Amino acid sequence: MTSLNILRSVKKLVLGRGRDFRDQNIFHKLALTAFLAWVGLGSDGLSSSCYGPAEAFKALAGHPTLGIFVAIATGVTILIIASSYSHIIELFPYGGGGYLVASKLLSPEIGVVSGSALLIDYVLTITISIASGADAIFSFLPGNMLGFKLWFAVFGVSVLLILNLRGIKEAVVPLVPVFLLFIVTHFIAIVYALFSHMADFGTVYRETGSELASSVSTLGYSGVLFLILKAYSLGAGTFTGIEAVSNGLPVLREPKVETAKKTMTYMAVSLSVTVMGLMLAYILFDVRDTPGKTLNAILFQNIVASWNGHYGMIFVWITLFSEAVLLFIAAQTGFLDGPRVLANMALDKWLPSRFAMLSDRLVTEKGILLMGTASLAMMVLSKGSVDFLIVLYSINVFITFTLSQLGMVKHWWEKRESEKRWASKLAVNGIGLVLTTFILLSVLILKFHEGGWVTILITGLLVMGAFFIKAHYKKTYDTLKRLDVIVEAAVLTGADVSDKETAGSCPMPAFEPESKTAAILVNGFNGLGLHTLFSVFRLFGESYRNYVFVEIGSIDAGNFKGADEIGNLGNFVRNETSKYVDYMKEHGYYAEAYVSIGTDVVEEINKLVPDITARFPNIVFFGGQLVFSKESLMDRWLHNYTVFAVQQNLYVHGIPFLILPIKV
């Protein structure tokens, strides 16, 4: 067994067998119901209750009862942002992530800024979720075990990476029981905190009033307002993840819009109730920040302090365990939506096109690998520090939030004459724009020197890289467009020959299996394919009497949206190769076409080769390859070098394959 076969066997063992995209039910099998989407996508938002409220509450040091105002403002903001994203879901039923919204409603260039920020955000989603989960677990482990926390977090990212390479449902379904455990344990904790202090509500009300008066007398009205707004802004991590549902529409079950809106409702209600309940519980149990422990861990410990026996500690352990696993589930959002943003930007040529390709498990494998690798690097570089990561996290997500809201405000204003409810929708997105802009500017100013500049630098570099890649692809495209004159010439000469054939001067060619045959790999009826065909004529003249045209329809994230799209791809490929066949027959040559569609072009060609060589034993394969005058590593990274892989595979089986250069 060769080393390549061994690697394939290991991959199949770890990731599972490939999926059949021809299965008419495959989209239903892969898609998530509203409940599973709440687990896989909504968990990102809900998990932010593990660290967002704590960050806001710690900013109120010395004035804890002011947390009531922060809790109310936070809960209302969650509902407003969720409502505004429901409008985005309606407007973009096939996926309305921040990249697409900004690209379509503002400009492609602004969309790149939003998409780049979103990519960094999803890397940080994975990193901060796993790091926070590790914090929750290690809060009640012996202090001498803290040295293992970072390695535990690295292990967590690695496990999720493998699960996502296997597929979407395989990564979500096993996590459902623990997700429900989080909901139940936190509901019990919040309800117990409220009911056990029911008699103290009057005292809390009076203390809040007296503390507010005391704060006003010492800080002034503007000082108190600043303190509340500062805490509200620093708790911005609470709002992260709300956009995940609109980004993840393509993985939801039909009807996608209804499923997405139902998922958004589940997430918004559960998050707002949990956040407000936890912040009120912090006040009621007088929770104070303690090094080495999360505020939630301290809260749960205070709650069970009066419980009898070991039941209290068991409850704390179960609750913290559910938090840790929910945070691991939240990291799942980065693996679900991050590769999708990568694929959308790759399809628009802002990023290498390989990020849009699917694996045999029908997932964007390269995107998942990139997100996982980047997260592992960020985890190691930040040493798993949640305080540092949350600064980076909050800034980037609110860049996307703000641009999305701005795009929607612009859209509703332009549609005010045709949309009956434009005013109410404009108001919702307008309020969302004001809130997200305020939070973005506040966090950026308050946390710029504590790490905020890092995320701006990283995002800026990614944006610059995207513009460079786009310029390279555009330059190559403009060069290849010059070859399209060949298509025009071919169509004209084909028409001339057809007229002669109609007059009876050109007999139909006969099939001669023993004659020399040229098999040409093509990718559509275009200048590139015709250039390769004419190069064969130029080099070998009349040596070949039979011509075979081989084309593989590559299934990527752009066309893997339903059975109809796959069918359209197959029809397109057959139509394109039939043009080559007709052209050659009109010129007196025998020609056939072999087509297939799949996720791996090389593998699909290998499947076709035995039938082709059996029918045409005296055959030579040809493929055209772009050659740059000054080839760089960037050229190799951005362009497809499939013909080299095909050549290598055919050589192993003793089949000749010639690569014909196309200089650009």
Image: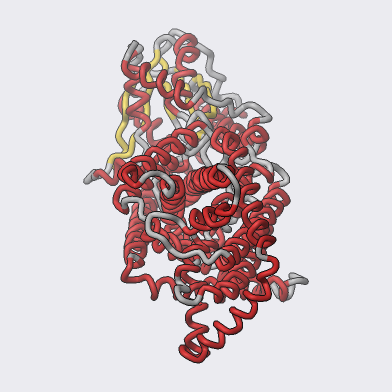
Q: Indicate the position of residue 80 as horizontal and vertical percent values.
A: 64, 68
- Pick whichever, 95 or 31, lies toward us: 31
- Pick whichever, 256 or 108, lies toward us: 256
Seen at 58% across and 30% down, the residue is: 574
Seen in the picture, residue 569 relative to 197 is either above or below; the reply is: above
> Which quarter of the rendered picture does the C terminus lie within?
top left
Seen in the picture, residue 555 relative to 592 is either above or below; the reply is: below
Q: Which residue of the protein is positioned furthest toward the right in this rendering?
A: 420
How many marks the image carries: the answer is: 0
Seen at 42% across and 16% down, the residue is: 517
Q: Indicate the position of residue 294 as horizontal and vertical percent values.
A: 45, 56
Q: Indicate the position of residue 330 as horizontal and vertical percent values.
A: 52, 48
Would you say residue 524 is visible in this rendering? no
- Pick whichever, 567 or 290, lies toward us: 290
Q: Which residue of the protein is positioned furthest toward the front in this rendering?
A: 308
Seen in the picture, residue 400 relative to 484 is either above or below; the reply is: below
Q: Is residue 349 left or right of residue 174?
A: left
Q: Quadrant of residue 270?
A: bottom right
Q: Quadrant of residue 618?
A: top left
Q: Which residue of the protein is positioned furthest toward the left in this rendering?
A: 630
Q: Indicate the position of residue 433 as horizontal and vertical percent values.
A: 57, 73
Q: How is the image coloured?
A: secondary structure
> Which quarter of the rendered picture does the N terminus lie within?
top left
Q: Is residue 178 left or right of residue 416?
A: left
Q: Quadrant of residue 625?
A: top left
Would you say residue 145 is visible in this rendering? yes
- Pick whichever, 502 or 245, lies toward us: 245
